[in-house]
Image (cartoon, helix red, strand yellow):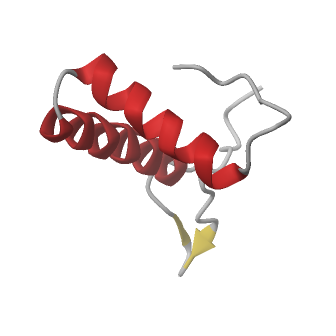
């Protein structure tokens, strides 16, 4: 995709060019939408994994670091 900023184009034209490049890269509009939805899903899963849910009702939430025990050095 061409991410170079052109000084004489407005942002709407740049977005249209990005869309055209994406469709050309993927081969069809449907494939471009599929690729974008896949990328969004990957980003959401990654963001969900990186969010700390903290200490809730006496237990650490899923994915959080467990509490240290006395027998650990």
Instruction: Name the foreground residue: 70 vs 51.
Output: 51
- Residue 69 in the image: above or below residue 59: above
Position of residue 8 relative to residue 13, above or below, is above
Residue 4 seen in the figure = yes
Task: List the single residue furthest toward the right.
Answer: 7
Instruction: Decide which of 1, 61 is in the foreground and name it.
Output: 1
> Picture coordinates of residue 16 (x, y %)?
49, 45
- Total residue callouts: 0
Q: Is residue 46 above or below residue 52?
A: above
**Is residue 62 toward the left or the right of residue 12 in the image?**
left
Q: Is residue 16 above or below residue 32?
A: below
Residue located 73% across and 50% down the image: 10
Res 71 → quadrant: top right
* Residue 48 pos. (x, y %): 48, 54
Say which quarter of the image contains residue 28: top left
Residue at (56%, 50%) from the top-left corner? 64
Q: Is residue 65 visible?
A: no
In the rendered view, does 6 fall on the left or right side of 42? right
Q: Position of residue 19 (x, y in %)?
A: 42, 39
Residue occupying the far front of the picture: 8
Residue furthest to the bottom in view is 57
Classify the position of the C terminus by image quarter.
Answer: top right
Which residue occupies the foreground of this view, 63 or 2? Answer: 2
Give me the residue at 58% from left, 65% from top: 53
């Amino acid at each position: 995709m061409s991410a170079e900023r052109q000084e004489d184009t407005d942002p709407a034209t740049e977005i249209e060019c990005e869309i055209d490049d994406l469709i050309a890269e993927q081969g069809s509009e449907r494939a471009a939408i599929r690729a974008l939805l896949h990328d969004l899903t990957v980003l959401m899963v990654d963001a969900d994994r990186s969010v700390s849910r903290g200490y809730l009702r006496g237990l650490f939430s899923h994915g959080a670091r467990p509490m240290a025990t006395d027998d650990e050095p």
